[in-house]
Image (spheres, helix red, strand yellow):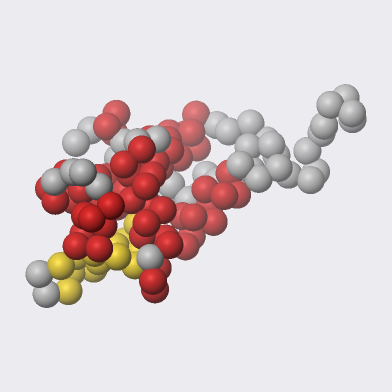
Amino acid sequence: MSNSEGLVPPGADPLTCCVPLSREPISPEQAATVVPMLKAIADPARLRLLSLVLSHEGGEACVCDLLPHFDLSQPTISHHLKVLHESGLVDREKRGTWVYYIARPEAMAAMAGLFTADTGARTAVDA
């Protein structure tokens, strides 16, 4: 899979770029590292999967927990979870025959922080 398909660029930490957009303009390099996370959650199925993982008891879920919520096959659900994992939004752990997914707290905080208004930013009233 190439970077244009939503993978984090090699050696890039997608969480290092996440300063509030209202604080300063994002650089091309920073944009390139955060875009895979945004692309990953831009898909309705993946956004729902992330929401289901986050809201599941204990904050983790396996494919068997997620399948009943979709009219999609298990391989399709697994593919979407792989995209979420490769973008840095979720971690996974194999336990027996099942793989459990958990949202990365630092990724969730970084994504929230990206769109948080910086109180030091100029407003239309200040201009």
Residue 94 location (% of width, % of height):
18, 69
Q: Quadrant of residue 32?
A: top left
Q: Considering only vertical position in the picture, is 31 above or below 13?
A: above
The percent position of residue 89, horizontal first and vertical second, equals 38, 52
Front-most of residues 48 and 17: 48
Left or right: 111 in relation to 47 = right
User: Can residue 115 be seen in the rendering of this structure?
Assistant: yes
Tell me: 97 left or right of 3.
left
Placement of 68 over or under 42, stated as above or below? below
Q: Nearer the viewer, residue 58 or 120?
A: 58
The residue under the point 54% across, 56% down is: 109
Residue at 27% across / 32% down in the picture? 5
Taking the spot 80% from the left edge, 43% from the top edge, the residue there is 120
Which residue is depicted at the point 50% across and 29% down? 28
Q: Which quadrant would the N terminus be assigned to in this image?
A: top left
Q: Give the left or right position of residue 124, taking residue 42 as reference.
A: right
